[in-house]
Image (cartoon, rainbow, N blue to C red):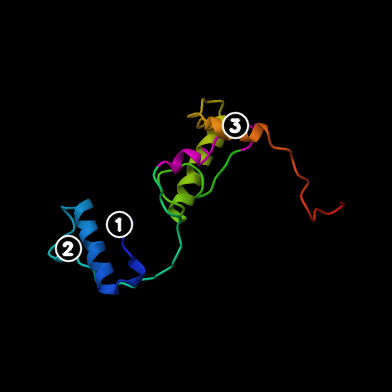
């Protein structure tokens, strides 16, 4: 859960909670008591702040892989996909971006871009571009 301080938990508590979650997801293959699939060894790695907080309603601000700009496709864990900002999210976003590129190259319709939230468009319309600092030749 999001309110659990997993960093402070012992390795054993983390593994027990993980096994219970796996049992919930795969009830015919895994039992937390070890009576089906068996966990043979493990290593718990704690990485504080490794992913952002999953705040409800924030996903609408993540851009889709398809953009309105010709020949410009986005990929990255920060784009719209079903995982949090993680390696898994980055891989899935890359796959989704590749689908956009392949569909466009084949002349096939794409799944379509995600609508941009109205107030983001309004904010962008009122922005004055700022020249980047430190660019060579300036």
The relative height of residue 82 versus residue 112 in the rendered view (above or below) is below
| Res 14 quadrant in image | bottom left
Q: Residue at x 74, y 40 (%)?
A: 129
The reply, left or right, for residue 97 in relation to residue 44 is right
Q: Residue tagged by mark 1?
A: 1
Q: Position of residue 42 (x, y in %)?
A: 30, 72
* Mark 1 or mark 2: whose residue is earlier in sequence: 1
Measured in 3D between alpha carbons, the distance from the residue under mark 1 to the one under mark 2, in whole angstroms, is 18 Å
Magenta segment's dominant SS is loop
* Mark 2 or mark 3: whose residue is earlier in sequence: 2
The reply, left or right, for residue 52 in relation to residue 11 is right
Q: Residue at x 87, y 52 (%)?
A: 137
* Mark 1 or mark 3: whose residue is earlier in sequence: 1
- Is residue 41 visible from the viewing direction of this image? no
> Dot 2 lies on which element?
loop
Q: Position of residue 34 (x, y in %)?
A: 15, 66
Are circles 2 and 3 on residues that touch, CB within 8 Å? no
Q: Position of residue 110 (x, y in %)?
A: 51, 29
Residue 32's disc is 2
Measured in 3D between alpha carbons, the distance from the residue under mark 1 to the one under mark 3, in whole angstroms, is 34 Å
Q: Residue at x 76, y 49 (%)?
A: 132
Label 3 neighbour load within 10 Å: few <14, some 14-19, many 20+:
few
Q: Residue at x 53, y 35 (%)?
A: 100
> Dot 3 lies on which element?
helix
For marks 1 and 2, give the one nearer the viewer: 1
Q: Which residues are magenta?
A: 57-72
Label 2 neighbour load within 10 Å: few <14, some 14-19, many 20+:
many
Q: Position of residue 11 (x, y in %)?
A: 29, 73
The relative height of residue 132 versus residue 43 in the rendered view (above or below) is above
Q: Residue tagged by mark 3?
A: 121
Along the line of sight, which residue is nearer the eye, 38 or 135? 135
- Is residue 75 visible from the viewing direction of this image? yes
């Amino acid at each position: 859960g999001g309110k659990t301080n997993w960093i402070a938990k012992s390795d054993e508590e983390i593994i027990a909670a993980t096994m219970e979650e796996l049992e919930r997801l795969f009830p015919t293959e895994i039992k937390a008591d070890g009576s089906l699939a068996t966990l043979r060894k493990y290593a718990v790695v704690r990485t504080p702040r490794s992913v952002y907080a999953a705040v409800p309603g924030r996903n609408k601000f993540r851009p889709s892989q398809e953009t309105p700009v010709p020949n410009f496709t986005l990929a990255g864990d920060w784009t719209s996909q079903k995982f949090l900002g993680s390696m898994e999210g980055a891989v899935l976003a890359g796959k989704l971006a590749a689908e956009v590129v392949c569909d466009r190259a084949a002349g096939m319709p794409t799944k379509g871009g995600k609508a941009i939230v109205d107030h983001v468009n309004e904010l962008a319309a009122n922005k004055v571009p700022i020249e980047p600092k430190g660019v060579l030749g300036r």
